[in-house]
Amino acid sequence: MSSQFTAPPFENRPESISDLALPLAIGKGWIKFLAITQIVFASLYVLVSFGLGLIVAWLPIWLSIVLLQAAEAIDRAQVQNDAAALKVALGKLRLYFMIQAIAMIVGFCLAILGIIMAITLGLSMAKFAHLPH
């Protein structure tokens, strides 16, 4: 895979880094909005839980920082026509989505485990309840 950015074969001019970063630069505001709202809600969660929420809330805070770093790199790539900044931005976005996917898989596994435990507990309680059938 080449690290050179070129236009499709039907065009003769190479794309500039600013042009390649433009779709991300247009959505940069939404990326920052998502990051800031995640930080605010995770921080509120930590405050409401008297600090115990930090056990869970560190992940959204970290992911929000990654998104803010991606937004800054997108801006640098678009304004300064910087290929290295675009590469950093795409790497940060890859990291964000990878961690989100792993967290979702872990969440699904924990949900399935919880359902199995609830069914098992329910069936075991039915044996001890001596309820008429």
Image: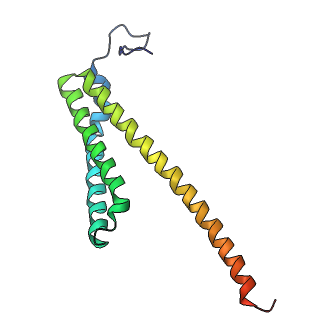
- Residue lying farthest to the top in this orientation: 12
Q: Residue at x 51, y 56 (%)?
A: 107
Relative horizontal placement of residue 19, taking residue 110 as reference (left or right): left
| Quarter of the image that includes the N terminus | top left
Q: Residue at x 48, y 46 (%)?
A: 101
Between 133 and 73, the residue placed more toward the observer is 133
Between 19 and 108, the residue placed more toward the observer is 108
Q: Residue at x 20, y 30 (%)?
A: 76
Q: Residue at x 26, y 33 (%)?
A: 74
Whole-percent x, y for residue 116 in the image: 65, 66
Relative horizontal placement of residue 30, taking residue 97 as reference (left or right): left
Whole-percent x, y for residue 46 in the image: 29, 66
Compared with 126, 9 (above or below) is: above
**Quadrant location of residue 67?**
top left
- Residue lying farthest to the right in this orientation: 133
- Residue lying farthest to the left in this orientation: 80
**Quadrant location of residue 122?**
bottom right
Relative horizontal placement of residue 130, taking residue 51 as reference (left or right): right
Whole-percent x, y for residue 31 in the image: 30, 44
| Quarter of the image that includes the C terminus | bottom right
Q: What colour scheme does the image use? A: rainbow
Compared with 68, 18 (above or below) is: above
Whole-percent x, y for residue 28 in the image: 27, 40
